[in-house]
């Protein structure tokens, strides 16, 4: 008993601030991984891997299975190769989020968003109202600080002012560009007919292709996306991988102003901090 007490005292004596920091970093990493995969297919994969590992560990220990025990002890080497493949979308999203929060990375590679002018905001809202009234399906992406040039290249460059007539014409049912997305940067329509990544997360279940694309682009970037349903004419708003349905024009107008103002302010702060 005395020896056990001495060992415990000795162990606690070696516990330093460095040990506490080490434990905290590991805990934060595990928590971040769990939050990263929550609500995605990787969540189920991770649970399955953990359950299988526990099951085979118990079986190997109970029946003294030498080969199974050897495989389990060497499985971390296999996981080092398989994890980047299985969790590729989640890892990419995590790295993009880190990049968006890093001033060093953001400048000068970030898109310097400009606040949308009241006239352009009114034109955008008028376009959404007309599209909803006519039940024209629409997918409008508002670029944030993350550049969307990869997606712009997948469509047709427009580089025109944001006007209601232009947007309604693009999403007219017989227009060759109506099935793709429009990407807007500040007061300019960059491109139309753009192809966006489709989300396969739990948040996208039950939605059509346009809504899944809206969730997908907001999962991978800090953009916002406005969706007009072709079936019902309702307006939805996607942000950070989540979508809100049946959004009013008043709420949408406030969001547009806040969105562009926040990202233009962030870009100016990043630029000033890097000087």
Image (spheres, grey):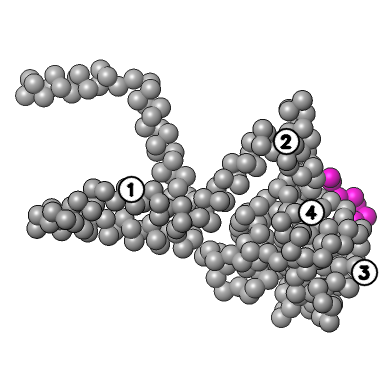
Q: Which residues are magenta?
A: 114-121
Whether tag 1 and tag 4 are in contact, CB under 8 A, the answer is no
Above or below residue 211? Residue 104 is above
To which residue does mark 3 refer?
165
Determine if residue 136 is in view.
yes
Q: Earlier in the sequence, mark 2 or mark 3?
A: 2
Residue 42 lies in the magenta stretch: no
Q: Earlier in the sequence, mark 1 or mark 4?
A: 1
Whether tag 1 and tag 2 are in contact, CB under 8 A, the answer is no
Numbered badge on residue 256: 4
Q: Left or right: 80 with respect to 39? A: left
Inter-mark Cα distance, 4 to 3: 19 Å
To which residue does mark 2 refer?
107
Name the residue: 75% across, 74% down.
179
Determine if residue 243 is in view.
no
Inter-mark Cα distance, 1 to 4: 48 Å
To which residue does mark 1 refer?
77
Q: Earlier in the sequence, mark 1 or mark 2?
A: 1
Q: Left or right: 237 with respect to 165? A: left
Q: Quadrant for the N terminus, please.
A: top left
Give neighbour class at mark 2: few <14, some 14-19, many 20+ (Cα, 10 Å).
some
């Amino acid at each position: 008993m005395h020896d056990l007490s001495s060992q415990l005292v000795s162990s606690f004596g070696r516990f330093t601030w460095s040990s506490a920091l080490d434990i905290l970093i590991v805990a934060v990493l595990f928590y971040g991984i769990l939050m990263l995969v929550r609500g995605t297919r990787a969540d189920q994969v991770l649970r399955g891997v953990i359950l299988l590992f526990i099951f085979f560990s118990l079986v190997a220990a109970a029946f003294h299975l030498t080969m199974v025990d050897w495989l389990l002890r060497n499985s971390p080497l296999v996981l080092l190769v398989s994890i980047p493949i299985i969790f590729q979308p989640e890892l990419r999203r995590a790295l993009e989020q880190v990049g968006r929060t890093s001033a060093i990375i953001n400048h000068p590679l970030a898109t310097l968003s400009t606040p949308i002018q009241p006239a352009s905001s009114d034109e955008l809202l008028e376009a959404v109202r007309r599209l909803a009234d006519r039940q024209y399906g629409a997918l409008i992406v508002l670029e944030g600080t993350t550049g969307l040039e990869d997606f712009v290249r997948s469509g047709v460059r427009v580089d025109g002012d944001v006007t209601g007539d232009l947007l309604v014409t693009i999403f007219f049912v017989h227009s060759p560009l109506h099935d793709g997305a429009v990407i807007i940067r500040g007061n300019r329509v960059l491109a139309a007919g753009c192809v966006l990544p489709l989300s396969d997360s739990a948040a996208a279940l039950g939605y059509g292709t346009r809504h899944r694309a809206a969730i997908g682009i907001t999962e991978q970037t800090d953009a916002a996306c406005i969706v007009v349903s072709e079936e019902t004419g309702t307006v939805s708003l996607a942000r950070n991988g989540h979508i809100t349905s049946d959004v009013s024009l008043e709420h949408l107008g406030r969001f547009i102003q806040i969105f562009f103002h926040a990202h233009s302010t962030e870009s100016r702060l990043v630029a000033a901090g890097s000087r």
